[in-house]
Image (cartoon, rainbow, N blue to C red):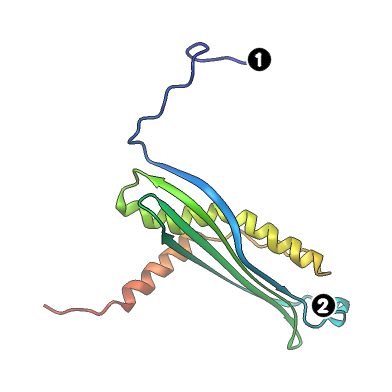
Amino acid sequence: MTTKNGGDGPAPAAPENMPSLSVLVQYSKDFSFENPNAPQSLMQQQQPQIGIQINVNPRQISNTDFEVELKLEGKAEQGGNVLFAFDLNYAGVFRLMNIPQENLGPLLMIECPRLLFPFAREIISTAISNGGFPPLMLNPVDFVGLYQRKLAEMQAAQPVTQV
C-alpha cells in the first residue's frame, strides 16, 4: 500500500540555500595491476604479507565543484617476492552547494572518499581475482582518522611564530 502526503502534486522544492552534496561523476583516472612472478606466484599456499597505502587528494575545479582523488596502492609479498601489486587512482567530481567554509575540509576528506571507496574496493578485488588470486576484500577505511592525521601533520609542519 502506498500513501502520499499532500496529494498528487510535485514534491516541494528544497530551499535554494540548503546545503547539498552531489556526485556528478566518478571514474578511474589510473589503474595498474601487476602479477610479475606468475605462474609461480599463483602456486603459493601460504598467506602473503599485504601492505596498503591510502591517500585522499581534493582539488577545486570551480566555485562549487571539487575533484576528489582516492589513491590506493598495495602489494602482496611472500619470501621477498612480489606476488601482486596494484595502484588505483579513483576519483569523483562532487558539487558542494551552500556549505560553510569550515565544513569543506571534512566533507572533501571524509565523506567524499567514503562514497568513492566501495567502488574502488570492487575494482581492486576484481583485478586481483582476475589475476588468479583469491579476491582481496579491503576493510572499511577510517577516513576520519586519516583526516585527523593529515591535519596534525599540517599543523606540525607550520613554523611556530613567537610574539
Name the quadrant of the C terminus.
bottom left
Name which residue type carries label 2: Gln
140 sits to left or right of 148? right
Tell me: residue 22, above or below residue 110: above
Neighbours of disc 1 within 10 Å: few (<14), some (14-19), many (20+): few
Q: Which mark is residue 79?
A: none
Depth-wise, is mark 1 or mark 2 nearer the camera? Answer: 1
Q: Which residue is drawn at 41% across and 47% down?
A: 96
Residue reaching furthest left? 163
124 sits to left or right of 56? right
Name the quadrant of the N terminus.
top right
Q: Earlier in the sequence, mark 1 or mark 2?
A: 1
x, y percentage for residue 144?
46, 59
Q: Residue at x 76, y 67 (%)?
A: 128
Residue on which disc 1 sits: 1
Q: Mark 2 falls on what kind of element?
A: loop
State the count of labels.
Answer: 2
x, y percentage for residue 25?
55, 50
Tell me: residue 35, above or below residue 109: below
Name which residue type carries label 1: Met
Q: Mark 1 falls on what kind of element?
A: loop
Cα separation between marks 1 and 2: 55 Å
Residue reaching furthest bottom? 80
x, y percentage for residue 159?
25, 80
Depth order, front residue of 45/1: 1
Neighbours of disc 2 within 10 Å: few (<14), some (14-19), many (20+): few
Question: Can you tell which quarter of the image residue 4 is in?
Answer: top right
Q: Residue at x 40, y 29 (%)?
A: 14
Q: Residue 46 carries which label?
A: 2
